[in-house]
Amino acid sequence: MANSLPMTLRLYRKLSSAMVPLAPALIKRRLKLGKEDPQRVGERRGMSADVRPHGPLVWIHGASVGEVLAAAALIERLRELNLPILLTSGTVTSAAIVAKRFPPDVIHQYVPYDSPRYVTRFLDHWRPSLALFIESDLWPNLILASAARRLPMVLINGRMSQRSFPRWQRMSSAIAALLGRFDVCLAQSELDAERFATPRQPQCRHHRQPQARRSRAARRSRKTGAADVGDARPPDRGRGLHPSRRGRAPRAGASHARRILSLAAHDHRAAASRSRRGDRGRGGRRRPARGLRSREELPTATTDVYVADTMGELGLFYRLAPIVFMGGSLVEHGGQNPIEAVKLGASIVHGPHVFNFTDVYEALDAAGGARRAGTQEALVKQLGQLLANPEAREASLAASERVVEQLGGALERTLAALEPYLLQLRLEMGAGNA
């Protein structure tokens, strides 16, 4: 296999092997920065204190919090089939989310560093029966070693952003070699499917699929939609808050970066000044009252800006806020997924940079289910209009809910694509119990 690899991948494998002696220094630095769990650093070297469950094992890998949460509905359906689940990710925050949100029978491990030695340890210990990779966290040694063991691999929720695509094209031979190890790529959109199957990047092949799946159509990268669209709602795990206090919640929110938070605070004050009067004191404007969630401060009727800076509580704040400004869209970050907010009853406003979820935003905008604001001034105007017009909010929400309903079904399409693999695993389970 090694001789058939592109030069870039051969060089990567050699360098990643040579870097193993530096792993202790890397781990020490990451521990100091809070990027590793001191109790579980062995998992980064492919070692684990957990025991592999008996029988077939489905391995699901996502880079961080977003990918892990996107897999929640799929994991639940696999658990209904009594299939043991191994979930890997690479961040401390994602591990905390798994511990908080997922059932205890879902085994979480940190993904090993991408060295052949560590990857081999990981695969030797867990011996997965099926590997599902979420979105595009493609570690070369992990993929190549899995393929060498003839482990069926499927890319779920495949996404290749406008920003990433040129980089992938520049490394087309290496990317093609990695994607070619996957049995099938299930993409979020038609555009993503096309990018995964460009002429410079050969289509995902089916060299290890069950015989029932060896059709010409099945060999293409194809669209299933985002598996988290319309399939799951974030839970309400708030401490000390309840959706019945909806009117007291912050009326616009943004997230992901300090710049976004500062923009949101500025725009909230401007929008509030248009929708409320009598807030000025004798000496000028009243100083905005703020609260910080991580300090356990609760909003009151006089709170202007409430910063939700905790993990795993989006479900609570989406339920509370009648209007949500989707963060990451006023700057070139690409925007956040608006579907969860829609499903929990919020009207959507977003900026111009939404290339992370182009299809979803285009559908929402076309149906009147979301409002686009190209500048801070336009954002203030849109927020002010929605704040002052409950009928407009309800109309926007109704339109967005119709769009989400039409976009739904991705989970079922994903499960349908996985059915030959799942059937094989169930047969193995039956044979093992006989």
Image (cartoon, helix red, strand yellow):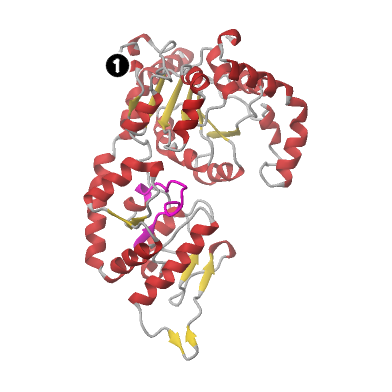
Q: Mark 1 points at which residue?
A: 217
- Quick one: which residue is furthest to the bottom in this view? 282
The answer to which of 105 and 318 lies nearer the viewer is 318
Magenta-colored stretch includes residue 334? yes
The answer to which of 274 and 49 lies nearer the viewer is 274
Q: Residue at point 26% right, 62% down? A: 393
Q: Give the range drawn in magenta.
A: 322-340
Residue 413, quarter of the rendered image: top left
Q: Position of residue 334 (x, y in %)?
A: 43, 46
Q: Where is residue 21 in the image (x, y as percent from the top left)?
A: 78, 26
* Quadrant assignment for the C terminus: top left
Q: Tell whether 31 sits left or right of 396.
A: right
How many marks on residues?
1
Crowding near the residue tagged with mark 1, few <14, some 14–19, many ≥20 C-alpha atoms within 10 Å: few
Main SS, magenta residues: loop
Mark 1 element type:
helix
Q: Position of residue 136 (x, y in %)?
A: 48, 31
Amino acid carrying label 1: it is: Ala
Q: Residue at point 42% right, 53% down? A: 315
Decide: is 344 above or below 76: below
